[in-house]
Image (cartoon, coloured by chain):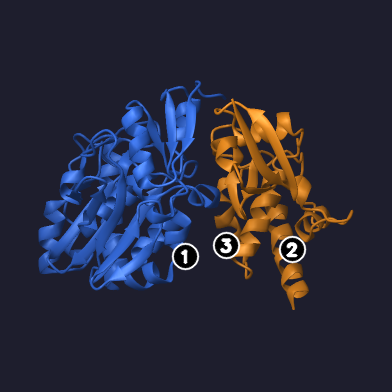
Chain colours: A blue, B orange
Amino acid sequence: MITYQFAYRRAKSLADAQAMFANSPEAKFLAGGQTLIPTMKMRLANPPELIDISGLKELSFIRIDGQTLAIGAGTKHHDVAVSAEVRRAIPALAQLAEGIGDPAVRHMGTLGGSLANNDPAADYPAAALALGVTIKTTRRTIPADDFFVGMFATALDDGEIVTEVSFPIPERAAYAKFDNPASRYALAGVFVAKNKNGIRVAVTGAGPSVFRVPAMESVLAKSFTADAIKDIKVDASGLNSDIHASAEYRAHLVGVLAARAVRASSGS
Amino acid sequence: MALVSMTVNGKAVSAETEDRTLLVYFLREQLRLTGTHIGCDTSQCGACVVHVDGRAVKSCTFFAVQAEGAEVTTIEGLAKDGKLHPVQEAFRENHGLQCGFCTPGMIMTAVDMIRRKPQLDRDTIRHELEGNICRCTGYHNIVSAIEDASKRMAGDAK
């Protein structure tokens, strides 16, 4: 398959990428390309220009700043998965990164690209929402609660580039995913985090966009055990239904996966 | 059109190509390196896996222009001085192929996997092969071949 014609430009820096975009406002940024390129090959996207930001060293880093794990938006999934810092600070995040796609995809795909794309079945949005991250861009900082606004939709403006994601280090966290065996995307995935300011439960794969489950969060705040949430029913209305799974099945999976994640993070 | 220069299997190459040319087409049609296969062309089957700067990538999901200045290794670049790479040798000895279509991608993935994880058990190998599909379903011997190759290469390294 061949994409429509476009012009390729490789940015030398973030400033360079922004200047290129100013001259070509219909351009798309190319980070890992593992969603954008297949979409262009299917001719579902037709940008006149691609601005390649995949090689920008200033976007690729992992560091611990006190109680925060900061990861550059251009950091590849593979590098997050094998990072000693990530494994030490938030092992659930390393495990999540290791479960994205397959090894070749993880060598290309990036954290910032995944968040900016906000695929309803992507893994990273669940971690971002459950851990209450702060997303830094070329223009501002956006809390996770305000970032994901709908299916493939985020608070990002045209030309705005995610540069860094700050993950507050949780007391405990785990991610449980029921993946589609062909695509490895989540039919449903639940990230549970016991943060300093409370419990957060975020679900991906099941709805049009990542969402929280307040009913589980309030119960888990009192008793952080899988048993505590076993009677909570997730409403199937509004959830995704497709050839892979019905909305009712996905709703059921959310309960099962939430319990698995609580068990994995608490040992209960 | 753009002039793209990269190193492929240790040899410097330059060629004019469209910006939209995928690396797999560049390798196959412009460099005539047809060992890298196009299977699904939708990033799923892994028949097109090559190494770019030492990392396995799907060359159907990668533009040739992105490889400007990069070191690319394809299946043709593994054998040295007429001698098969240990992974190729292990695939031959363990009958790790049936029709052979997926084999170049399987081998490039295996070489990358052994580089990253020198200690491989069968479960890990199966997990690492999630991005490579064998339509003959010949996975059993593919896993055996990779397990065998990883042991040989660990032995060679000692």
Q: Secondary structure at mark 3?
A: helix
Residue drawn at x 19%, y 35% as measured from the top left: A237
Residue drawn at x 43%, y 28% as measured from the top left: A49
Label 3 vs label 2: CA separation? Answer: 14 Å
Which residue position holds label 1? A82
In-front residue for pair B43/A2: A2
What percent of the width, then of the height, locates residue B43?
Answer: 54, 38
Any mark on residue B149, and which? 2
Badge nearest the viewer, 2 or 1 = 1
What percent of the width, then of the height, locates residue A220?
Answer: 15, 64
Which residue position holds label 3? B124
Q: Chain of mark 3?
A: B
Classify residue A137 as left or right of residue B117.
left
Any mark on residue A48, and which? none
What percent of the width, then of the height, locates residue B15?
Answer: 69, 32
Q: Secondary structure at mark 1?
A: helix
Q: Chain of mark 2?
A: B
Q: Secondary structure at mark 2?
A: helix
In the rendered image, which quarter is residue A199 located in?
A: bottom left
For the C terminus of chain B, the quadrant is bottom right
Label 3 vs label 1: CA separation? Answer: 15 Å
The amino acid sitting under disc 3 is Thr
